[in-house]
Amino acid sequence: MSESAQPVRIAINGFGRIGRCIVRALYENGYRDQLQVVAINELADIETISYMLRYDSTHGRFPGKVEVADERHLLVNGDRICVRHEADTARHDWASLNVDLVLECSGQIKTRSECESHLNGGAGKVLISNPADSAVDNTIIFGLNHHTLTADQRIVSNGSCSTNCLLPLLTLLDNEYGIDAGVTTTIHSAMNDQPVIDAYHSDLRRTRSAVQSIIPVDTSLPLGIARLMPQLAGKIESLHVRVPTINVSALDISLQLRSEARAGDINDMLQAATAGSLAGILGMTREAHASIDFNHDPRSGIVDATQTRVSGGKLLKMLVWFDNEWGFANRMLDTACTMMSRQRPGTADS
Ligand SMILES: NC(=O)c1ccc[n+]([C@@H]2O[C@H](COP(=O)([O-])OP(=O)(O)OC[C@H]3O[C@@H](n4cnc5c(N)ncnc54)[C@H](OP(=O)(O)O)[C@@H]3O)[C@@H](O)[C@H]2O)c1
C-alpha cells in the first residue's frame, strides 16, 4: 500500500459477537491504517450498540473511546460510524457511504445470491463470516489459500473458526506424513443460538440449556475440508459439541497417517511452522493450560504439544486450542486486507 492510499471503507452487517470483535481487533491490533469502519447495520438501538461495544464479559472493556454522537452516528476513537437498523438486505444503501467492503456478520446470509443484495446496494465486495454455498467466488482460510484471492473475486467466505484452526494444520500433516483417514471433534463454547434455559428451537438439541449440558450439534466441517483440501474428501468425519464455557474452543483430532511418526517429531515439525510459514496463524504451547488461557488469542489455532499422542506408529491424536471469537475476527481482518490488496499489520507481504 502506498503511503497516500486511503483506508478501505468497511461496513459491518450484524454487530454481534464477531462484528464487535472485529471493531475491537481493528483498533487493538494495528489494522486501522488499512481499514476504516464507516457503517454498522444492526437491529439493536444505538445506545445498546454503544454499551455493548464498551463492555464485554469475554474480552473486557473497550480500550478506547466509544461515544454516541447523535441518533445515527457513533464515534469510536474519534472515527465517525454511521449506524443503521435495516433488517431487509434488499434495502441496503452502501453507495451513499462509499462502502468498499461489507463484512457480513449477521449469520443470516449463506449464499452468493443473498450476498448480491450488498453489491446491488453499492458495496464493492463482501466478506462473509461463515461458510457459504459453492457459488461464492472463493473461501479463504488465511495461511492456507489467501494467495488465491484475485481482484475480480467480489463475494468471499472466510470459512469458520474450526476450518481456520484445522486446515493449515491438516495441510502440514498431509504433506509430511500423508493422511489416510481421520475423525475430529470440535469442543466449542456456547453460542448465541443456544438458550440459557430450555427454550423452543428448530434443532431439538439446541432447545436445551447451554449452561447445563454438553450438547452435540451438526457440523459441516467435512464439507469445508472437501472443498478446500479435495485430496482429503471423504476421508475425514467430524463431530461438534457445545460446552458450557463462554469462549475458547478446542479441536480433538485423530488421524490415521500413511507413514510412521513419533509424537516428538510431529511437534517439532509443527513448531517450525509456527515460526515460519504459519507465523501468527498457528501457535504451539508446551505448558500446562486450560482453555481460558487462550481467551483473546489472535491465532487461528494453538497446538497443545503436551497432548500429542501416537498409537501403533500411525494413529495420531492431537488437541488444538482456538479462541473462536478473537482468532476468527482477526482472520476476517487479515482476509479483508488481502481482498483489498492492503498490507496485513506486522508483515511485509500484501
Ligand atoms: N461466535 C463465534 O465464535 C463465531 C466464530 C466464527 C464464525 N461465526 C459466524 O459469524 C456469524 C455471526 O455469529 P455471532 O456469534 O457474531 O452471532 P451473534 O452474536 O448472534 O451476532 C449476529 C448479529 O446480527 C444481528 N442480525 C440478525 N439479523 C440481521 C439482519 N438482517 N441485519 C443486520 N443484523 C442482523 C443479530 O441481531 P439479533 O440478535 O437481534 O438477531 C446479532 O446482533 C455466524 O454465521 C457464525 O456462525 C461465529
Image: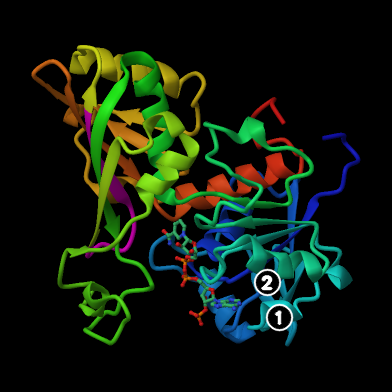
In the rendered image, the vertical position of residue 117 relative to residue 152, given as above or below: below
In front: 349, or 25? 349
Q: Quadrant of the N terminus?
A: top right
Q: In the image as oriented, which residue stretches furthest toward the left?
A: 312
Residue 233, image x, y percentages: 38, 36
Residue 84 on the magenta span: no
192 vs 53, left or right, is left
Task: Say which of 339 and 327 sits in front.
Answer: 339
The image position of residue 184, as x and y in percent, is 25, 42
Question: Residue at image x 32%, y 80%?
Answer: 202
> Regarding mark 1 in the picture, which secondary structure is present there?
strand
Residue on which disc 2 sits: 40
Pointer 2 with pointer 1, Cβ within 8 A: yes
Task: Judge left or right: residue 350 versus residue 334.
Answer: right
Instruction: State the image quarter where residue 260 is shown.
Output: top left
Q: Residue at x 57, y 42 (%)?
A: 140
Name the residue: 80% across, 75% down: 93
Q: Horizontal and vertical percent for residue 13?
A: 64, 69
State which region is magenta: 243-255
User: Upstream in the sequence, badge 2 or badge 1?
Assistant: 2
Check disc 1 and give the amino acid type.
Arg
Magenta region, main secondary structure: strand
The amino acid pointed to by label 2 is Ile
Q: How is the image coloured?
A: rainbow
Q: How many marks?
A: 2
Mark 2 residue element: strand
Residue that numbered label 1 is attached to: 84
Q: Nearer the viewer, residue 212 or 140?
A: 140
Q: Is residue 263 above or below residue 333?
A: above
Dot 2: few (<14), some (14–19), or many (≥20) neighbours within 10 Å?
Answer: many
- Above or below: residue 66 compared with residue 255: below
